Image: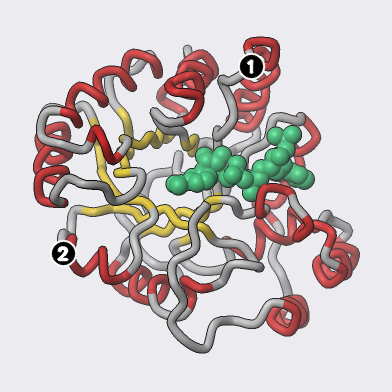
């Protein structure tokens, strides 16, 4: 079963994309970050996620450098700070992002999280940018179901939220609702930031059965759900290759049951997890 989302038909929307948080902070790392993103694009991870927040624009500059000469191959996602999400703030923030990204259009522009401005005001500003061709789609991030009900706008294309085997809260209500609405879910921290989740023995066992790594199991697990896109961040070239290779990994029923036993699915509403 596949969920039809506003992006289903766009071949640049890879099920596994690339995150960029913490890129652009250290000039000594810049060449490696640019190379990692370019390598990832070549290997089919053509959705690239960034935000004006990351390194205060530094990550967008890294992305701009990485996509130079290959802009048309990439589905570019960026995010506006809540404190810029006003009628006047959105277009000026977007202009700054476009300049740093060295492009004339962002494919998907997200409100990074809910802030002080009324949602209608932000949405109106997004719609104006869409009319002007400066963004192709807009969406939100860190919105729980009640926020989406309040938003009540069918033009919202995505909700970007925390999702990995150790953080399954969205499966109770947010994910099924989003799937039914055709709203794409973008899973951030799909590797739980490479912490102890990747050393969990059950993930190691599943990985061993397939001859892959626990990180690859996490990516295959997150994207097993229709309409879910994972955006792992990787600078290490080996990580980039492994993440790209996870695009072809399909977990078996036995694997899913083992993961369910180790990381039970939610049986009641949980507060939306965020980092
Ligand atoms: P991730 O879960 O993607 O983990 C990133 C870490 O995993 C890095 O240390 C990376 O190392 C390591 N890693 C990458 N691939 C592998 C691999 N195959 N094996 C082992 N380790 C690996 O965390 P992020 O916080 O970066 O989340 C992903 C993206 O989601 C962000 O970069 C950002 O774009 C987005 N995001 C959005 C948020 C929001 O509020 N909307 C919040 C948080 C993230 P290395 O870099 O050395 O390769």
Could you tell me residue 2's position as x and y percent?
44, 68
Looking at the image, residue 72 lies above or below residue 171: above
- Residue 136: image tag: none
Could you tell me residue 109's position as x and y percent?
30, 38
Looking at the image, residue 63 lies above or below residue 77: above
**Residue situated in front as seen by the camera: 135 or 80:** 80
Residue shown at 75% from the left, 60% from the top: 197
Task: Look at the numbered disc 1 and give the secondary structure of its residue.
Answer: loop
Could you tell me residue 68's position as x and y percent?
48, 13
Q: Residues within 10 Å of mark 2 (few under 14, many from 20)?
A: few
Judged left or right of residue 264, residue 105 is left
Sequence-earlier tag: 2 or 1? 1
What residue would you read off at disc 1? 26
What residue would you read off at disc 2? 152
Q: Residue furthest front?
A: 116
Judged left or right of residue 193, residue 123 is left
Looking at the image, how many numbered discs can be counted on the residues? 2
**Residue situated in front as seen by the camera: 1 or 190:** 190
**Residue situated in front as seen by the camera: 204 or 149:** 149
**Hey, which quadrant is residue 177 in on the image?**
bottom left
Residue shown at 46% from the left, 71% from the top: 170
Residue shown at 59% from the left, 26% from the top: 23
Judged left or right of residue 42, residue 124 is left
Task: Look at the numbered disc 2 and give the secondary structure of its residue.
Answer: loop
Question: Does the image show residue 240?
Answer: no
């Amino acid at each position: 079963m596949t969920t039809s989302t506003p992006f289903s038909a766009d071949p640049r929307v890879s099920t596994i994309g690339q995150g960029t948080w913490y890129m652009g902070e250290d000039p000594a790392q810049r060449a490696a970050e640019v190379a990692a993103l370019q390598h990832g694009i070549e290997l089919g991870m053509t959705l690239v996620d960034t935000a004006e927040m990351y390194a205060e624009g530094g990550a967008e500059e890294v992305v701009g450098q990485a996509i130079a000469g290959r802009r048309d191959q990439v589905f570019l996602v960026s995010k506006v700070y809540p404190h810029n999400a006003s009628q006047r703030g959105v277009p000026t923030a977007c202009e700054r992002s476009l300049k740093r990204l060295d492009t004339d259009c962002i494919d998907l522009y997200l409100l990074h999280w809910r802030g002080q401005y009324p949602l209608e005001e932000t949405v109106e500003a997004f719609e104006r940018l869409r009319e002007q061709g400066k963004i192709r789609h807009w969406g939100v991030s860190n919105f729980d179901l009640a926020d989406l009900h309040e938003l009540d706008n069918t033009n919202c294309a995505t909700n970007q939220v925390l999702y990995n085997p150790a953080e399954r809260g969205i499966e109770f209500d947010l994910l099924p609702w989003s799937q039914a609405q055709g709203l794409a879910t973008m899973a951030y921290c799909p590797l739980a930031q490479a912490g102890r989740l990747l050393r969990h023995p059950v993930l190691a066992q599943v990985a061993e059965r397939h001859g892959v790594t626990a990180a690859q199991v996490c990516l295959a697990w997150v994207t097993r759900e229709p309409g879910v896109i994972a955006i792992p961040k990787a600078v290490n070239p080996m990580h980039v290759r492994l993440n790209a290779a996870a695009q072809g990994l399909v977990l078996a029923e036995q694997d899913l049951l083992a993961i369910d036993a180790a990381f039970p699915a939610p049986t009641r509403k949980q507060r939306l997890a965020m980092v």
